[in-house]
Image: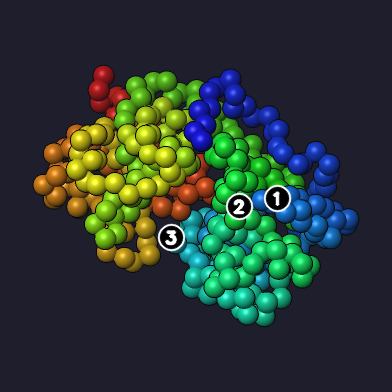
Amino acid sequence: MRIIISAGVVTAALVLTGCASSTSSDGPASGPTTGTTVTSCGTELSVPSPPERAVTLEQGATEVMLALGLQDRMIGTSYLTDAVAPEWSDAYAGIPVLADQYPTTEQLREADPDFVYSMRASAFASEAAGNRQELVDLGVPAYLSANDCEDQTLIPDEVGFDAILDEVSDVARVFGVEERGRALVAEQRATLDEVTAAAADTGEPSVVWLYSSVNGAPVVAGANGLADTMGSVAGATNAFADLDAQWGETSWDEIAQRDPDVIVVADLTRGLPGDSADDKIDQLRSDAVTKGLRAVQDDHLVPVPATELDPSVRSIDALETVFTALTEYSEERR
């Protein structure tokens, strides 16, 4: 599932799935007066008019909406895994939080949304907000990211930045703010162009992407997820490219055997022991197995908010952070 984006492939041209049939201009409350249709994980969603009472079920969806300036269309949100990005914190503060984690079916229906959005399939579990198809059958369009369909056979083989940007375009079209969507997509594609053009200079250092270490077993990025894609775009090799998973458990001994040049450390703020980047870095520096690693000895430990390592509108920020670290690593080696 890896994507390797070369300079000849990533362009600033906005070739986005499903957008050709929509035209509108953006004003504070402008949008198409007629409905639109989008397909989400195999489900066709009919949206009769731009939603005014949207609910987002987790942080990734919330931040897509905020990045598009749609906070005035949101009547509820839920489930933060990290702090909201500073540029959106004021907008986020004005949106009601329905639940600390996922809202229940009852909480969601009590909010009476006209659009529901999540980047995680777990939000639509029976013990969470309820079955997505049931919402659709009730006339509430429920959009789920292509990165995490309920039916995993529907997840594209190449899930990465293109899928994220297609999703931004879908949401912008649904809410009648296509110009905002085009501007955001163009900005992120420009960053992809810049990183891709310079990636050959990094020297392809090996990277371990360390997500968590709850219960003692480290969880690292394998070959099938966005972290691996980021590494390919930024000019790195994944030390666990042989792991057939987006994220999977390994051991500290195995990490030590692979002795990476750089370790990207996810900063989780959910409060469990070992979740923060500081906790992980302290463990790497003190553990007898890992304190001798090249990345630890040379201080090539790169903290990144965990939210940015999952597919989201902020993943481009993680790409920039990692690319900067790889460039610094390369310069030190010259």
Which residue is at the front of the view, 21 or 156?
Answer: 156
Q: Name the residue tied to disc 3.
A: 82
Lower sequence index among marks 2 and 1 = 1
Label 2's element? loop
Q: Name the residue tied to disc 1.
A: 42
The answer to whether one can see residue 227 in this image is: no
Lower sequence index among marks 3 and 1 = 1
State which quadrant residue 65 falls in: bottom right
Q: Which mark is residue 151?
A: 2
- In the rendered image, the quadrant that contains the C terminus is top left
Label 1's element? loop
Q: Position of residue 50 (x, y in %)?
A: 79, 59
The relative height of residue 26 versus residue 15 in the rendered view (above or below) is below
Q: Position of residue 63 (x, y in %)?
A: 57, 56
Q: Position of residue 33 (x, y in %)?
A: 88, 57
Asked if labels 1 and 2 touch by Cβ distance under 8 angstroms, the answer is yes
**Residue name at image x 49 percent, y 70 percent:** 101
**Residue name at image x 34 percent, y 45 percent:** 220
Which residue is at the front of the view, 216 or 95?
Answer: 216
Label 3's element? loop
At label 3, which amino acid type do we have? Asp
Are there few (<14), some (14-19), or many (20+) residues within 10 Å of tag 1? some
CA gap, disc 3 and disc 2: 27 Å
The answer to whether one can see residue 46 in this image is: yes
Which is more foreground, mark 3 or mark 1? 1
**Residue name at image x 68 percent, y 29 percent:** 13
The relative height of residue 47 versus residue 330 in the rendered view (above or below) is below
